[in-house]
Image (cartoon, rainbow, N blue to C red):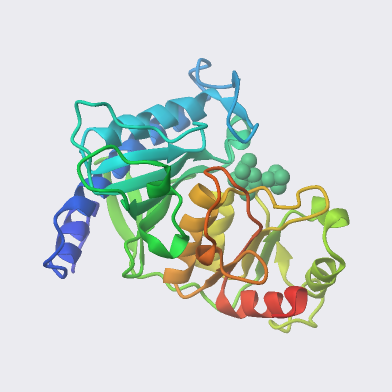
Amino acid sequence: MQGNINLTRFIYETQKAFPTATGDFSAILNQIALAAKIVSMEVNRAGILDDVLGYQGETNPSGDDQKKLDVIADNVFFNALEHIEKFCIMGSEENENPVKLPKRYKKGRYAILFDPLDGSSNIDFNVSIGTIFSVFRRTSPEGGDGNLQDLLQPGYKQVAAGYVLYGSSTMMTFTTGQGVNMFTLDPQIGEFILTHPNIRIPDATRYYSINEGNSANWSDALRSYVDTLKTSDNIHGKVLSGRYIGSMVADVHRTLLGGGFFSYPADSANPSGKLRLMYEANPMAMVIEQAGGRAIYGEGDIMGIIPRELHQKIPVFLGSKKDIDALQRAVFGK
Ligand code: P6P
């Protein structure tokens, strides 16, 4: 592929390599890109239109205060995705229960989960925020409405996953199981252009990413491991810099491109951590592992977990294989 590859051309050209592809992914990814452009516009105007800043006055199923932009983003993604009749059921951070599609739409072969606007507590400070999505093939009989079991599948069964980062530029990163590709929105032509083909997470890094404000609540083993990163007595043989934005999409994006690891661990205050398995940990785990990295909850892999419920939380350690192997040995003895 030569020259400026836009998303539609990329999907078409990669899809040709898979004769069995039915064009489903093309429709799904193009609609996610459309929704991303709309949310990007809303996020970039938020400071101007005071009707989108501030709190909705509600809380989501995880108890987080809903920001108005959360709800706008949720509606934009649902509307963009329900029309293409590729899904039988949807799940989102902003909805307690799975969302069935309107009767007028044919029910498709896929189930999708998403966090429409992750990191939204940062909206008012103009810190980068993002959308995260995870796609499964349905397990229920084709044709009818999907159900909760179509969503509660282990992460290794995802057929696509990715994120949109609304930052100094809007970027869309995804995998369909054949590596990871990243696109940057050119706002002048309204197209996502392939800027980072076939990403591999680097072994070398300058960074580690964890909220050290919680360190008093960590296990002794985790605290000791992180302390070694502030000396040269670690696998990198040098002092690393802590980089923590507090917006998962931004922290994972930097880890994907800059190496090291990102973690939201369990601690004495949050015994299951804070991040949600189905629409934060699983999709980011697929992206990181497709880029050659690893994603664990502790003793085991995130994508091997059999889910119990839609909004369940899970500890997260993800990044370069070198970093995660060393951390898992030191902290979990595996
Ligand atoms: P803390 C944002 O609210 C979020 O869900 C993730 O995007 C982010 O990684 C985490 O919470 C930050 O949490 O407790 O460090 O502010």
What residue sits 15% from the left and 53% below the top? 23
What residue sits 54% from the left and 72% below the top? 294
Q: Residue 30, how many percent across, how many down? A: 24, 46
In this view, the residue in front, 304 or 3, is 304
What residue sits 81% from the left and 47% below the top? 269
Q: Residue furthest top?
A: 51
Q: Quick check: 274 left or right of 99?
A: right
Q: Is residue 187 visible?
A: no
Q: Residue furthest front?
A: 141
Quarter in which the C terminus is drawn: bottom right
In this view, the residue in front, 176 or 167, is 176
Quarter in which the N terminus is drawn: bottom left
Q: Is residue 81 visible?
A: yes
Q: Quick check: 225 left or right of 187?
A: right
What residue sits 48% from the left and 45% below the top? 168
Q: Residue 221, how many percent across, how many down? A: 83, 71
Residue 33 found in image quarter: top left
In this view, the residue in front, 56 or 271, is 271
Q: Residue 114, how many percent across, how many down? A: 44, 43
Position above or below: 298 against 89? below
Q: Residue 37, how many percent across, how many down? A: 34, 37
Ligand 1 shows up in which quadrant of the image? top right
